[in-house]
Image (tube, rainbow, N blue to C red):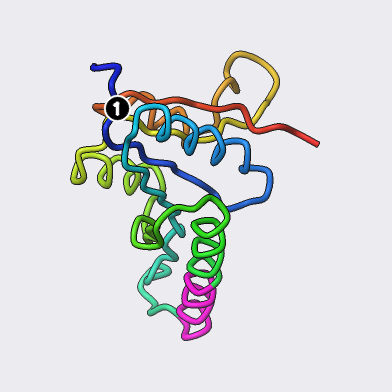
Amino acid sequence: MSSNYSHILLATDLLQEANAVSEKAKSLAGLYQARLSVIHVVESIPIYFGNELVLPETQEIERQLLDQANRKMAELCKEFAIPESQGHVEVGVTKLEIINFAEQNDVDLIVLGSHSRRGLEHLLGSTARAVVNSAECDVLAVRVPTK
């Protein structure tokens, strides 16, 4: 992989604790004069439970989660001076959506948060571990500070 990045993807959970990750991605984009995109994935709610159709309340919950994520994404883009058009909220399986976005948009560095846990088996969270193992581009896992 080249060390001159042209398109950096910040994968965020949109929580306040992730500001350190956002700051690192913004800093790297400035350093490399790279385009910075941001992605947040709302985990999809299954449509079927066994052979039964999803309840209308489930669809409403997903819509509310999307609305909330879109508002937070707009706030994050404004706070870090990222063009709102570079903020993306997707629905699906988080690790797959991040990897697919990166592949489809010629991303050459993914920046995401890693929560501190105990033991070597918990070095990275499951999403971070899946992205590190599956992405075709470089991945930077930034430790998310614990309070």
Q: Residue extending furthest top?
A: 120
The residue singled out by tag 1 in the image is: 5
Amino acid beneath label 1: Tyr
Q: Residue extending furthest right?
A: 147
Residue at the spot x=42%, y=34% of the render? 30
- Give the quarter of the figure containing the N terminus: top left
- 53 or 90, which is in the foreground? 90
Query: Going by the image, does 59 lie left or right of 9?
Result: right
Kindly indicate the quadrant of the structure image that contains residue 137: top left
Magenta segment range?
55-67
Residue at the spot x=47%, y=82% of the render? 55
Query: Going by the image, does 113 lie left or right of 135?
Result: right
- Give the quarter of the figure containing the C terminus: top right
Image coords of residue 109 (percent x, y): 34, 30
Q: Magenta segment: does it hold 65?
A: yes
- 84 or 109, which is in the foreground? 84
- 2 or 59, which is in the foreground? 2
Image coords of residue 20 (percent x, y): 62, 36
* Label 1: element kind: loop
Residue at the spot x=25%, y=45% of the render? 100
Residue at the spot x=63%, y=51% of the render? 15
Residue 115 position (above or below residue 49): above
- Magenta stretch: dominant secondary structure: helix
